[in-house]
Image (spheres, helix red, strand yellow):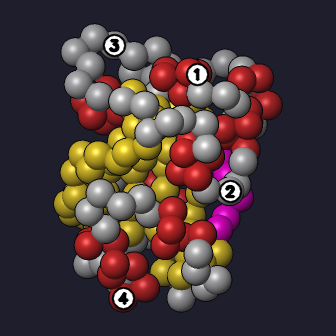
Amino acid sequence: MTLAHFPGRDPFRMAAWQAPRAMRGWLTDDRSLTARIRARCGQFSLRVVRQRKGAVLPDELAALGVHRHGEVWQREVLLIADGEPVVFARSLVADSGVPAAWHLLRSLGRRPLAAVLFDDPRVVRSALEAARLDARDPRWHHARQATGGDHGLPPLWARRSVFRRDGSPLLITEIFLPAIRNLAP
C-alpha cells in the first residue's frame, strides 16, 4: 500500500509494521538516528543541502501545530555513511524567525542536530510517525535532488516526529535512501 501526498491528506499515518522487516527498526527506534548510523559504519559525515526560509506542506504545518500558511525556517541535510548518502533529513521550525529555543540551529553548520536534541533534558519528543513516499510527494523530489539523482528513486520510507523545547516545536522528517540497506538493521 502506498500513501503519498494528496491535498488535505497526511502521508505520515502509516503503521511501521507495514514496512519491510529490514526497515522497521529504522522507522521505530526513537533514539538518535545519527548515533545508530555512526555505530554501523566506518566513517560518518553530514552535508548541508540547504538552510533557508520557505513554504512547507499543509501536513507539515499541522504536525508543527501551525494554522497559518507562510514560510518557516528549514534545514535539509544528507547523512552519509562510508561515502554513501543513507538519509535525507528535513528540519522545520514553526516560526518564520527561529525562536529562541532553537536559535542554535542556524549555527550548526555540518554538525548533526542529534547532540542538541538528545543531550538536552528540556527537549521532549513526540511519537514517531511513518510514511512511504513516492514521486507524488514533494519530499521525495527533495531527496532525489539532494542526492543528485537525475533518474527516479524507488518509493522511500520515512519517519518524522516533533521535538519541543520550551514549548517551541521543531519537526524532523528523516527519509531513508536506498543505501540504508547497506547498514546492519
Q: Which mark identifies residue 31?
A: 2
> Which residue is tagged 1?
181
Q: Which mark identifies residue 25?
A: none
Q: Amino acid at mark 1?
A: Arg
> Which residue is tagged 4?
100
> Which residue is tagged 3?
152
Q: Earlier in the sequence, mark 1 or mark 4?
A: 4
Where 2 sits versus 89, above or below?
above
Q: Residue furthest top?
A: 151
Query: Does the magenta run of residues contain 61?
Result: no
Q: Amino acid at mark 4?
A: Ala
**How far across and how far down the image is residue 106, in percent?**
26, 72
The magenta region covers 125-129
Say whether marks 1 and 4 touch (CB < 8 Å). Answer: no
* Residue at 24% across, 46% down: 49
**How far across and how far down the image is residue 47, in percent?**
29, 46
* Element carrying mark 1: helix
- Does residue 179 appear in this view? yes
In the figure, is residue 53 to the left or right of 155?
left
**How far across and how far down the image is residue 37, in percent?**
56, 42
- Quarter of the image for residue 31 reads bottom right
- Does residue 96 appear in this view? no
